Amino acid sequence: MVHFLDITKEHCPMTFVKVKLKLEQLAAGDRLEVLLNEGEPLSNVPKSARQQGCKVISITPDQPPFHRVVIEK
Amino acid sequence: MEQKLSIVCFSGDFDKAVAAFTLATGGAATGRPVTMFFTFWGLNLVKKRSGRTWIGKGLLARFFNFLMGGPGNVPLSRLNFGGVSPRLMRGMMKKNNVATLEDLIEAAKALNVNLVACEMSMNILGITLDDLLPEIKEVIGVSTFLDYSRDAQIIFI
């Protein structure tokens, strides 16, 4: 199952806090697509996801300055 | 396992509390076991009642607790202007989509940050665990805090 989370309006630390809390709700094997800003969220969200034992499937540029990060739990 | 983080929340100032909870939630969200130890003025941040109330054992304690209030009326460390500035600051934070102190406290609870309170300060102020948020898991002394903080980064705010 693929879930979606938009954190483009969030700032540190709520960017990766919201991703962490969302990932906790997911079942193993579920995917989370995160729409986020470049800069701090783009560098920290994938890192935080990996630290939680999740797999970062892809990081794709969207309409500037946004990116889409797909994470598998 | 990521390195542990322990934060001594001594200050009851709004801006310092935002800094403490930002560090705590950021640490917890990146996999660090985080403990927040609330002592002296910091206890105001985790009182169950948001505003000024006459809690405490004894007349002087009740008077002190009333003056100090709860998380809803903590002052700015500078330019407080009689409590007007924290209200303005909350408005600015919301307008700019920055997490408010209340948002950060809720996030800390959701992230299972280990929230503990200082036994000595609570004795001075005559308050009990019932006066604090239900998420305050324990009332502990410095020795237990140091045990929890073994191999941790300790930050004093």
Image (cartoon, coloured by chain):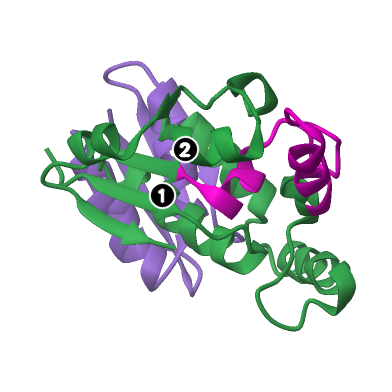
Chain colours: A purple, B green
Identify the residue at horizontal 50%, vertical 52% (top origin): B21
Q: Residue at x 18, y 34 (%)?
A: B147
Which residue is pictured at 61% across the width and 68% down the height? B15
Output the chain of dot 1: B
Q: Secondary structure at mark 1?
A: helix
- Marks 1 and 2 sit apart, C-alpha to C-alpha, by 23 Å
Q: Locate the C terminus of chain A and report the quarter of the image it occupies.
A: top left
Residue matched to label 1:
B24
Q: Which mark is residue B120?
A: 2
- Amino acid marked by disc 1: Ala
Residue B128 magenta-highlighted: no
- Exactly how many numbered labels are in the figure? 2
Q: Label 2: how many residues lie within 10 Å, few (<14), some (14-19) or many (20+)?
A: some
Q: Is residue B98 above or below residue B141?
A: below
Marks 1 and 2 in Cβ contact (< 8 Å): no
In reply to whether residue B62 is colored magenta, the answer given is: yes
Is residue A11 in view?
no
The span shown in magenta is B38-67
Quadrant in which the N terminus of chain A appears? top left
Residue B91 lies in quadrant: bottom right
How far across and how far down the image is residue B145, in percent? 29, 38
